[in-house]
Image (tube, rainbow, N blue to C red):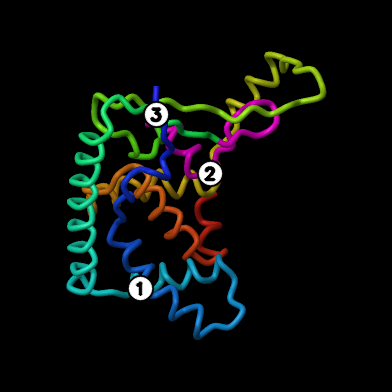
């Protein structure tokens, strides 16, 4: 059976916001010598918010064209590679659990499944192969009380922010995929000042 990786698949389409970021990022970096990545994202988020609906429309059009391109390329790839299994490696941390970002955690709290839309249509079968991590110490199961305590933890500020903003984003941009929603929520969160973030305790 032939295998391939996600890197060999057609390039995934981007949202309008990500097309905008690709346009303005070089300018931001050039005009702000030594700027940190987090500040670049903040400036891009502020710039996106400041755009008029008409200005955003051209990026949404590019996103729509890009999605159409991706779907055509994915369909052609599938026809040219019948029966190919795509091997997707998943990063894991000590203890064998997948490292999850706050964005992924909030999606799981909402009962949705976080996954990249890299799965070609049938007959291609997609499998996930986790990297093995060697742990010297023996794995000890946590006491039931400790597990229950973890489950009872209150959501953090970012999770509260996502619970409020996700429905608004789904209404204003229903075409976004789950991962694109997370990307935009993350950018919106980073664009907030520390004082504004404190409101979501």
**120 with respect to 140 (left or right):** left
Q: Residues within 10 Å of mark 2 (few under 14, many from 20)?
A: some
Per the image, the residue denoted by label 1 is 23
Q: Secondary structure at mark 1?
A: helix
Per the image, the residue denoted by label 2 is 102
Magenta region, main secondary structure: loop
Q: Quadrant of residue 124?
A: top left
Q: Quadrant of residue 131?
A: top right
- The residue depicted at 21 percent of the width and 45 percent of the height is 71
Above or below: residue 119 compared with residue 69? above
- The residue depicted at 34 percent of the width and 42 percent of the height is 178
Above or below: residue 181 compared with residue 57? above
Q: Sequence order check: which comes first, mark 3 or mark 2?
A: 2
The part of the chain drawn in magenta is: 91-112
Q: Is residue 119 magenta?
A: no
Name the residue at the bottom extreme. Answer: 31
Q: Position of residue 19 (x, y in %)?
A: 32, 64
Q: Secondary structure at mark 3?
A: loop
Q: Position of residue 24 (x, y in %)?
A: 38, 75
Q: Are marks 3 and 1 in contact (CB under 8 Å)?
A: no
Per the image, the residue denoted by label 3 is 111
Q: Are marks 1 and 2 in contact (CB under 8 Å)?
A: no
């Amino acid at each position: 059976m032939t295998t391939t990786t996600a890197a060999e698949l057609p390039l995934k389409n981007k949202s309008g916001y990500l097309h905008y970021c690709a346009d303005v990022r070089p300018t931001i970096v050039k005009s702000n010598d030594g700027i940190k990545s987090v500040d670049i994202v903040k400036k891009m988020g502020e710039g996106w918010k400041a755009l008029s609906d008409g200005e955003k429309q051209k990026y949404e059009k590019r996103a729509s064209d890009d999605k159409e391109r991706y779907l055509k390329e994915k369909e052609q790839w599938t026809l040219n590679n019948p029966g190919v299994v795509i091997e997707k490696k998943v990063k894991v941390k000590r203890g064998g659990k997948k490292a999850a970002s706050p964005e992924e955690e909030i999606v799981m709290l909402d009962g949705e499944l976080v996954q990249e839309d890299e799965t070609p249509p049938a007959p291609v079968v997609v499998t996930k192969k986790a990297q093995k991590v060697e742990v010297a110490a023996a794995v000890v199961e946590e006491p039931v009380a400790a597990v229950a305590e973890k489950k009872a933890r209150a959501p953090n500020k970012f999770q509260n922010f996502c619970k409020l903003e996700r429905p608004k984003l789904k209404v204003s941009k229903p075409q976004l995929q789950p991962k694109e929603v997370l990307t935009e929520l993350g950018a919106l969160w980073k664009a907030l000042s520390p004082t504004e973030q404190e409101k979501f305790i």
